[in-house]
Amino acid sequence: MELQTIWFFIWGLLWAVFFMTDGFDLGIGTLYPFLGTDETRKRVMINAMMINAMGPLWDGNQVWLITAGGVTFAAFPLVYAVMFSSLYTALLLILFGLIIRGVSFEFRGKLDDPRWTKIWDACIFLGSFLPALLFGVAFANIFQGIPIDEKGIFQGTVLTLFNPYGLLGGILFVLLFVHHGAIWLAIKSGGGLHESAVRAATRIWPVLLVAAVVFLVHTWFATNLYDNYLGNPILFIVVLLTVAGLLGSRVFMAKGAHFKAWFASALTIVGATFFGVIGLYPNLFPSSLDPKWSLTAYNASSSPLTLKIMLAVVAVFVPVVLAYQIWAYTVFRTKVNEQELTY
């Protein structure tokens, strides 16, 4: 298998793992103003995001984002340059959102003032909702093609990205993450908040199902993602596994098997990511103006020597990060209780 193809797969895998792990954190933050109806609930949700559930895990989740960006820079430098120029505003807003979210967790409890806490409560929501939405908008636009010319210069404005298909991708990502987060919150909480999280996951599911179907249908008309699947029908197993994960999350929630429901939801997110990645191949950053101007795994990659060295590094350190996260999730698998409520 060619090095470029291997790195294309690794690139997609890193984004899929990031969306799977940090998705439920963003989802809980998006649910925060709706389920956090009193101070105790809010603090449980913050602990579910930051301390009991996310303190030792949150940094690990962000590592996948940094690694995905680093791989884009090192393995496909031309894609990195064009992506961060054409999607600059959207990516900067994502960065600001993630920074504000992290700061909010730390600053919210510094003053005993309702106005102070309301400001940071709003920041927790915005710092979770905006990245979820904008990640979806960005990737949906990549799926359908970005208006870049032969020099890789973006021919449009930030509003160009907020087209119907891009917005649909953003809505789908938000729903995926919110559903994922509601299931995680059901796992980590008890009492009334647990029941509210279960209801939220149950009510969001049919909306997510409709959004997913609409997105798949719109993808047929707005993109060329299905070309690879029609050329190799065996690839449709990715779509079937994604659908199975989505249906399984609903079945397991109905049975009260919340851990199984979360893993099914995780499969849905990973499958949805790979649906787009496989459909893109070999394109990494397709041009909607002329296919000849698209950036692919072959015309935008680093030298073979660089790819070989990086492959050795990834083979050593990615299993280490995975082992750490598995250990951390195992150690902090218990529910958040009121005795553990700290900032």
Image: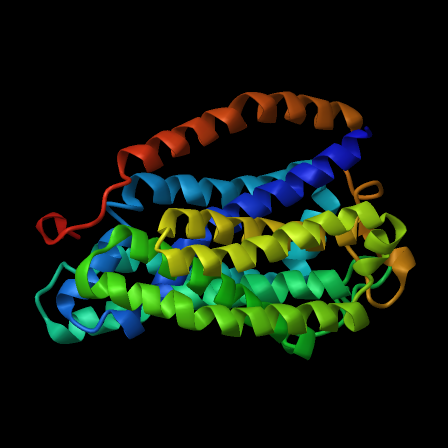
Q: Quadrant of residue 127?
A: bottom left
For this rendering, which residue is in front, 330 or 250? 250
Which quadrant of the structure image shows residue 154?
bottom right
Residue 201, image x and y in percent?
40, 65
Q: Answer with left or right where residue 59 lies relative to residue 195.
A: right
Q: Looking at the image, is 322 positioned above or below residue 78?
A: above
Residue 145, quarter of the rendered image? bottom right
Residue name at image x 82 percent, y 66 percent: 288
Q: Nearer the viewer, residue 93 or 327?
A: 327
Q: Indicate the quadrant containing the N terminus: top left, top right, bottom left or bottom right.
A: top right
The image shows residue 336 at horizontal and vertical percentages of 20, 50
All told, the count of numbered labels is 0
Please report the residue visible at 79 percent of the width from the left and 59 percent of the height from the top.
225
Does 1 sit above or below residue 39? above
Residue at the limit of the structure toward the front, as seen here: 255
Q: Nearer the viewer, residue 77 or 53?
A: 53
Q: Is residue 302 visible?
A: no
Q: Residue at x 78, y 36 (%)?
A: 5
Q: Is residue 215 above or below residue 226?
A: below
The colour scheme applied to this rendered structure is: rainbow
In the rendered image, residue 304, in percent from the top left (x then y), is placed at: 79, 26
What residue is at 77 percent from the left and 62 percent from the top?
153
Q: Nearer the viewer, residue 225 or 133?
A: 225
Left or right: 25 with respect to 341?
Answer: right
Q: Is residue 110 left or right of residue 72?
A: left
Q: Where residue 232 sits: x, y (%)? A: 86, 47
Q: Is residue 25 visible?
A: yes
Q: Viewed as shown, does residue 53 lie left or right of 70?
A: left
